Image: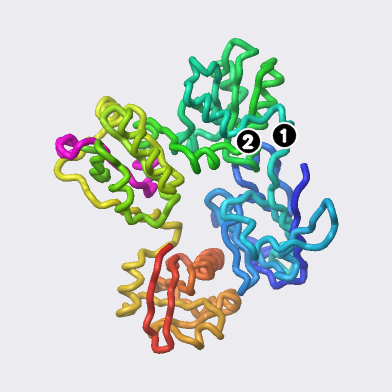
Amino acid sequence: MKFRSISMLSGAISLSLCAVAGAVEPASAPMPTARPTIAKVCTNCHKAEQNTLRGNFDNISFKTKTIQLKIDDAVELLKFDEKTLAVINEEKQSGDVEFLKNNKLKKGHEIKVDYSVANGVKTAIKLTAKPPVELPKDLLASTAVVEKLVALGPEKGKYFLYDSRPAPRFLEGTIPTAVNLPFPAFDKLAEKLLPADKSALIIFFCSGVTCNMSPGSATKAQKLGYKNIKVYKEGMPAWSEKHYGVLTAQAFKDAFLDKGISHVLLDVRPARDSAKGFIKGAVSFPSHHNAAPLIKKMVLKQKKAPIVVYDDKGGVQAIAVAKELVKAGYGNVKVMTGGFDAWKGAQYMVASGKPATKVVFVPTLRPGEIEVAEFKKYAASLPDNVMIVDVRPQEETNAGMLKNAKALPLTELRERVGELPKDKLVVFQCNTGTLAEMAYHTSKELGLKNVKYLNAKLKIEKNGAYEITMD
């Protein structure tokens, strides 16, 4: 497989490793948990390698020459040299194309980072962005083809549609009529879930053009003798841009409610029905006449926020509202199959009273993120047990700081970490949240436990007045 590579000078200033090489722990001390070097999903196709990290691109700071990588729930920070952040045109060898600066590498993109270690620190020397999977044209199924088949249904369309993503992703929503056959469990489940007819049309899809799970499933199915196999390479991301997905009542409970994942839940039944009982957290969205006016009134900036729609039986009205939401630009819309009847039938809790009528989405906080309201309280009157630390470069703090904040640039945090108290809550802030989050992870790595960061845009005037805005 060909990769697009970004070379990085090994002479860049690096971040320290979590443990000092050669340090010996007392016999009674517990062994530290090994930090993961490869994301679980990557292990389907790759093995862990020395001085290599595989995970998802999460953030970058050109001010501090730092890149942030997520490996499942863990975070790695590595230094780089900005001058080398360019993609080499491997085919034409005709110069460099700016990559990260032009936001061509999006948050969540799978990447491989090779690094060197010198004086106990990590330095990124090469970043490889995962390219689109290459497949023969006769193996591909387009969005238009999948649309037509789904509209017909499996019986009339004579097809079998399989979601190759792991079960947790499937539970969050899938393409209508799809069955979950996770690639990691393919060998175990194939005999049970694949059709007996080896000439039947079967289509696999997963998480988009760089995902190997549906192509891998197709290869395994071919080895089992199936003759009519297709891969919907664009997968769930492309489908969600144009269509609603589906999930069951149990999937909604397991994937969203039980995990505390932020979402918008719309009860589109008549108000008189929702007043008799509704799913906890639902917004009454009675749209039996026309959903468009209600959707137009929605003040929801986050177009990718998960929106789940239900009616009495997950039928006509929920689908109609879901279609209008997609048309309005919302790209993560799901219909709960079976609707409120399925919810009650599963004996899940039914809320009583008056449901909310205003649509609000509050994003789930990332690990270490502080509530904006809590930060404002500290900014107004700082308690003795709290310290606010501004980690922006000095030229920015010179232009204006919060009156009760301490200036400590991220680039100096490792050398000056001793200035931060261990008996207080330390809250990091910058002007976008990027440097603050990196400071949070660095300080945790250095042994501080009681730390948080502000993940918001913060504009500070010369006199210390400020304004916080959320994306």
Residue pointed to by mark 1: 135
Q: Is residue 469 above or below residue 194?
A: below
In the rendered image, residue 76, in percent from the top left (x then y), is placed at 60, 59
Label pair 2/1, CB-CB below 8 angstroms: yes
Look at 30% across and 73% down and name the residue there: 377
Is 199 placed left or right of 170 in the picture? right
Look at 48% across and 21% down and name the residue there: 152
Q: Image quarter for residue 364? A: bottom left
Residue pointed to by mark 2: 233
Segment tinted magenta in the rendering: 255-277
Which residue is nearer to you in this view: 344 or 320? 320
Look at 69% across and 15% down and name the residue there: 225
Amino acid residing under circle 1 = Leu
Is 355 placed left or right of 308 in the picture? left
The reply to whether the magenta stretch includes residue 274 is yes
Q: Give the class, few, some or many, for how many residues have Cα within 10 Å of label 2's Cα (few <14, many ≥20).
A: many
In the rendered image, residue 442, in percent from the top left (x then y), is placed at 55, 67
Which residue is nearer to you in this view: 32 or 317? 317
Q: Circle 2 — which element?
A: loop
